[in-house]
Image (cartoon, rainbow, N blue to C red):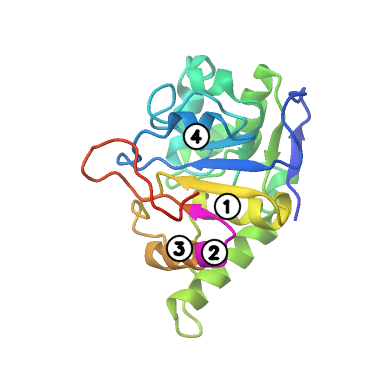
């Protein structure tokens, strides 16, 4: 399930593919100070406003995942200085996680119509057009990934048949994509700043269990949060 290219742009030549190491940096405020380890990774994947970028989580950004559905993207599109943000300027590639469906991708709803209608809307094409000004590739995760992830989380949560499946978080979709599409058996994936909390529509506990299961399998390292503010945290088995 490879991403769909919305804008080809110009890729950086110095990003190894496949990567040997990937740092995935979540936005939990208790992420701790891991700047050196994060910046040393072949790939550094960040999300949305990228908490800690330029400070405790380092400066490098090979991939920036930007949520393309709902009010956050609309707010960014309305911000004339959006493309001037340091994390966007630093990113080598942009990844949009939520596929709007083939029909909406082919024939998107007009911008003015969406703005006049209540509720959340898809902003995939508008986001791709805006980001294209930076000249970097803009890609979209396949819809099949979200659908399969939603079913997986429903099973993990023990939902009864017929219960609506929970929408996966952006972090869950991204890490699952990396494990299934990018990583080789020799790729190390370190996850920082994953607090499994936020919008109550996500199945946070089910996502946490999935990450912990993948860690037990040796497929990723889930670094603990720094709840006491002491900075860098580690475990004997974390490296």
Position of residue 57 measured from the top left corner of the image (x, y, whole percent): 43, 31
| Between marks 2 and 4 in the image, the one whose residue lies nearer the viewer | 4
Residue designated by label 1: 175
Q: Earlier in the sequence, mark 1 or mark 3?
A: 1
Q: Earlier in the sequence, mark 2 or mark 1?
A: 1
Q: Earlier in the sequence, mark 3 or mark 4?
A: 4
Q: Residue at x 65, y 59 (%)?
A: 145
Position of residue 86 measured from the top left corner of the image (x, y, whole percent): 49, 17
Q: Earlier in the sequence, mark 2 or mark 3?
A: 3
Q: Are marks 2 and 1 in contact (CB under 8 Å)?
A: yes
Q: CA distance from mark 2 to mark 3?
A: 11 Å
Q: CA distance from mark 1 to mark 3?
A: 11 Å
Relative side of 220 to 194, left or right = right
Residue 203 among those drawn in magenta: no
* Image quadrant occupied by the N terminus: bottom right
Q: Residue at x 59, y 59 (%)?
A: 219
> Does dot 3 land on a helix, a strand or a loop?
helix
Which of the 4 image quadrants contains residue 146?
Answer: bottom right
Residue designated by label 3: 207
Residue designated by label 2: 214
> Does dot 1 land on a helix, a strand or a loop?
helix
């Amino acid at each position: 399930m490879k991403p769909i290219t919305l804008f080809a742009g110009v890729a950086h030549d110095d990003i190894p593919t496949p990567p040997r190491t990937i740092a995935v940096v979540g936005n939990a405020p208790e992420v701790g100070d891991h700047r050196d380890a994060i910046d040393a990774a072949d790939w550094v994947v960040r999300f949305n406003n990228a908490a800690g970028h330029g400070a405790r989580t380092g400066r490098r950004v090979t991939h920036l995942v930007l949520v393309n559905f709902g009010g956050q993207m609309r707010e960014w599109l309305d911000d004339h200085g959006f493309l001037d943000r340091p994390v966007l300027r630093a990113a080598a590639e942009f990844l949009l996680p939520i596929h709007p469906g083939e029909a909406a991708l082919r024939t998107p709803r007009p911008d003015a119509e969406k703005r006049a209608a209540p509720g959340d809307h898809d902003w995939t094409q508008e986001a791709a057009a805006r980001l294209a000004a930076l000249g970097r590739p803009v890609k979209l995760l396949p819809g099949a990934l979200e659908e399969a992830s939603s079913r997986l989380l429903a099973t993990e949560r023990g939902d009864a048949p017929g219960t609506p499946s929970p929408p996966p978080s952006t972090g869950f979709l991204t890490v699952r994509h990396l494990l299934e599409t990018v990583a080789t058996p020799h790729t190390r994936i370190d996850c920082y700043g994953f607090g499994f909390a936020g919008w109550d529509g996500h199945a946070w506990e089910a996502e946490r269990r999935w990450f912990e299961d993948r860690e037990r399998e040796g497929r990723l390292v889930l670094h603990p949060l720094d709840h006491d503010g002491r900075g860098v945290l580690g475990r004997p088995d974390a490296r």
